[in-house]
Amino acid sequence: MTGDVRDAFGRPLVAVTGLGVVTSLGKGKDDNWARLTAGHSGIHRITRFPVAGLRTTIGGTVDDLFDRPFAAPELSEKLAMLAAEEAIAQAGIGSRGSFPGELFMAVPPVELEWAQKQELATGSNEAVSYDTMLLAAARYRHQAYHEMFLFGSVADHVAERFGTRGSPISLSTACSSGATAIQMGVEAIRRGDTEAALCIGTDGSVQAESLIRFSLLSALSTQNDPPEGASKPFSKNRDGFVMGEGGAALVLESYAAARARGAAILGFVLGCGEKGDGFHRTRSSPDGRPAIVAMQDALADAGLSPDQIDYVNAHGTSTPENDKMEAMSCTAVFGPRMASLPISSNKSMVGHTLTAAGAVEAVFSLLTIANGRIPPTINYREPDPNIPLDVVPNVARDARVRRVISNSFGFGGQNTCLVFGDEPA
């Protein structure tokens, strides 16, 4: 590539110099990539809490990180810490506890869980009720629980651990959150606000109440046996997504700064696009326009045409409606070429990591470029005749991949797409 440090629009080029990831497949890039490309699944029967009587009893949970009971925010924080450690170590940036840039973090919405509510009410002579829980919270361990379940606490702790600059940004844009965190880091570097950004998506919120809530929305797969066969994006017999957990981190730098310090360049974030629709709290707009516009805007932001994309990292949740909408939207953007353009879903193996998904899939997209291997969509046994796509069925495919578009489409009409490349457009 040339020595230019700005893109065709005169903006600073945004390079990726560090990657970190933890999912139900394993801890770290090497374990995840080996198992992902081997078509292994991290989805299993949930053992963390009782699931007897529930319609869905499986998940892509990340276990064995604690030797004691824990709450979802604690797991989200642990996943973020592990991913950030790996990414920063690979980037070799700054010094220990002093990251020379800002933090942008996607975290799940939080609320007090039942175990904590019950513990707060312990000691009251009255029957446990919402009012007695509020009183107990004020009298006993209010401060500790207040901090644990405060929306910004995870980002605050990560910022303290790694010494990021400025005020950490916590954000939650449903299932597009991880991609949004990366977009915010890109925009900050392009504006010249910072030379580096630590962008993280994390989600450790598989617990009984969240599982029941998604089940009540009829969003989850109920094909519990075998667990590893439940997530089947784009298949005719798909019936819902599988909740997953994970954390992923990217170190972004202006290319000029990264080159000046001799950093290894892992790839570039070439373009970002987002579009909100507000059509429905959970359903996608039936005409697919918001997703179409998000992809088109990401391509335009990258200065690329649709025929310059080599692979689509799908949102691919395995829900009947979302997969159909994504296929329709991609066809609208890429035209007849969509029949042969590879598109696959990592969620077939790690489940839907919700707030973390966009960041997890960004890491996998960049590893696809680096290794020239496209992860498969596993469990693809019954093709959907209404979705005639090349989903890289069941087995990974070796191919030269220079540019990837990664889709993240969330509840409430939150749509964010990112374009990654091996060099500037």
Image: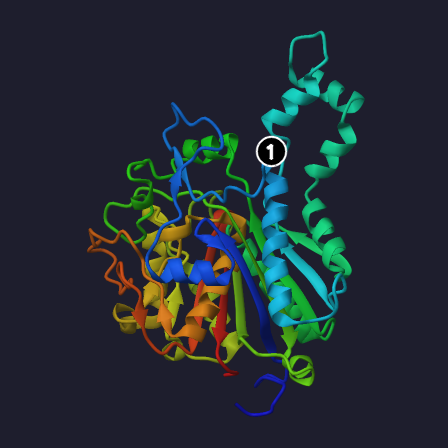
Please tell me whether mark 1 sits on a helix, a strand or a loop.
loop
Q: Is residue 320 left or right of residue 291?
A: left
Q: Is residue 361 left or right of residue 218?
A: right
- Percent position (x, y) of residue 157? 72, 49
Q: Nearer the viewer, residue 218 or 56?
A: 56
Q: Is residue 190 left or right of residue 358?
A: right
**In which image quadrant can residue 67 be found?**
top right
Q: Nearer the viewer, residue 266 or 69?
A: 69
**In which image quadrant can residue 85 be found?**
bottom right
- Percent position (x, y) of residue 305? 42, 79
Q: Residue furthest bottom?
A: 2
Would residue 376 be visible to someone looking at this image? yes
- The tally of labels here is 1
Q: Is residue 255 above or below residue 405?
A: below
Q: Is residue 85 above or below residue 219?
A: below
Residue located at (53% from left, 73% from top): 271
- Percent position (x, y) of residue 76? 60, 45
Residue at the spot of label 1: 68
The figure's colour scheme reads: rainbow
Q: Is residue 238 above or below residue 371?
A: above
- Percent position (x, y) of residue 112? 64, 31
Q: Nearer the viewer, residue 173 or 76?
A: 76
Would residue 415 be visible to someone looking at this image? no
Q: Badge 1, how many Cα within 10 Å: few under 14, some, many 20+?
A: few
Query: What amino acid is at disc 1?
Result: Arg
Q: Nearer the viewer, residue 228 or 6?
A: 228
Residue located at (38% from left, 67% from top): 312
Residue located at (45% from left, 48% from top): 24
